[in-house]
Amino acid sequence: MKKRTIIDYLGITAGSFLIALALTVFLVPNKIAAGGVSGLATVIYYITSFPIGITMLIINIPLFLVGLKIMGTSFGMRTIYGIISLSVFTDLLQPHMTALTDDLLLASIYGGVVGGIGLGIVFRSRGTTGGTDMIASLINYFTGITVGEGLLIADGVVVALAGIFFNLEVALYAAVTIFITSQTIDIVQEGLNFKKGVLIISDKADEINQMVVNDLNRGITEFEAKGGYTGNKKQVLLCIISRSEISELKKAVSKIDEEAFVIISNVNEVLGEGFTEIVH
């Protein structure tokens, strides 16, 4: 448990640094207030010149107290560490960093990617950096909505404010950044190693079962179902395979039963024997 905790805090540190980097070299210099507390702090910075890191810290205090009450001490410790890390990194980097581009589109895209990677790492380390990403984690905790989608919803208000204080064009680029950030977060959390879930309904289920087990060396689950229209009983097979095995499976099923009903869908993550180990 101690080793896992150390790894989590290292992840929060690295993720916070990447978020601060995205802010200081892409977003803030181009007035892209990409949602959340950081976006609000960006607006305040250009109005008052008050340091962004300190502003984020001040705004995050009440949000942290709410998260602490709801999620518990462990969540609270990781959150306060993330809040402080991001605030410190941002104010340390800003005086020494210059914008890598003044192209708003490039800044919004790369700011979203780098910031999304950072947030994804923080979330995978079971922490947050406060702000709307903490709200998104709470939404995910209670509803199951992905963290990326939660951020997309929560950040809309801040983008509207950016449009009022800056201009509509900058607000639109901020919306692009938020969308890219949300997608990147989900990729970091769920990974790119997508699998395929296959449902097969066939009168020759036993033969297909043996083919999957023997030829593809994959486990398979068989269960009984009943046709809604005919009322006839059918055997349904469920298996999870890699993308590279899809073509081989389809050919083999077609060879065994040309009338088989096959449903193939994307599976973002598979945990358990033969796939990714479950991390407690």
Image (cartoon, helix red, strand yellow):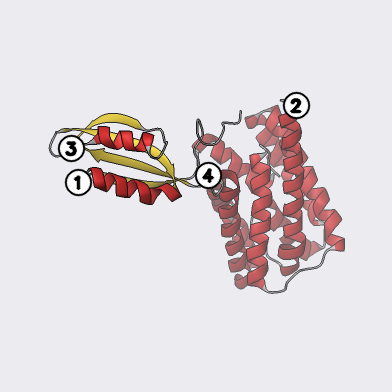
In space, the residues marked 3 and 4 are separated at their CA atoms by 33 Å
Q: Position of residue 210 (x, y in %)?
A: 32, 33
Label 4 SS: loop
Label of residue 146 in the image: 4
Task: Please tell me which residue is depicted at 70% across the width and 35% down the height of the picture.
Answer: 65
Q: Are marks 3 and 1 in contact (CB under 8 Å)?
A: no
In space, the residues marked 1 and 2 are separated at their CA atoms by 55 Å
Q: Residues within 10 Å of mark 1 (few under 14, many from 20)?
A: few
Label 2 SS: helix
The residue lying furthest to the left in this view is 230
Disc on the earlier residue, 3 or 1: 3
Residue 32, located in which quarter of the rendered image?
bottom right
In space, the residues marked 1 and 4 are separated at their CA atoms by 38 Å
Q: Position of residue 192 (x, y in %)?
A: 55, 49
- Could you tell me the amino acid type at mark 4? Thr
Task: Please tell me which residue is depicted at 14% across the width and 34% down the height of the picture.
Answer: 231
Q: Position of residue 272 (x, y in %)?
A: 51, 31
Disc on the earlier residue, 2 or 4: 2
In space, the residues marked 3 and 2 are separated at their CA atoms by 53 Å
The residue lying furthest to the bottom in this view is 103
Work out which quarter of the rendered image holds the N terminus and state it: top right
Comparing labels 3 and 4, the label whose residue is closer to the camera: 3
The residue singled out by tag 3 in the image is 228
Comparing labels 1 and 4, the label whose residue is closer to the camera: 1
The residue singled out by tag 2 in the image is 2
The residue singled out by tag 1 in the image is 259
Residue 34 in view, yes or no: no
The residue lying furthest to the top in this view is 1
Comparing labels 2 and 4, the label whose residue is closer to the camera: 2
- Could you tell me the amino acid type at mark 1? Glu
Q: Are marks 1 and 4 in contact (CB under 8 Å)?
A: no
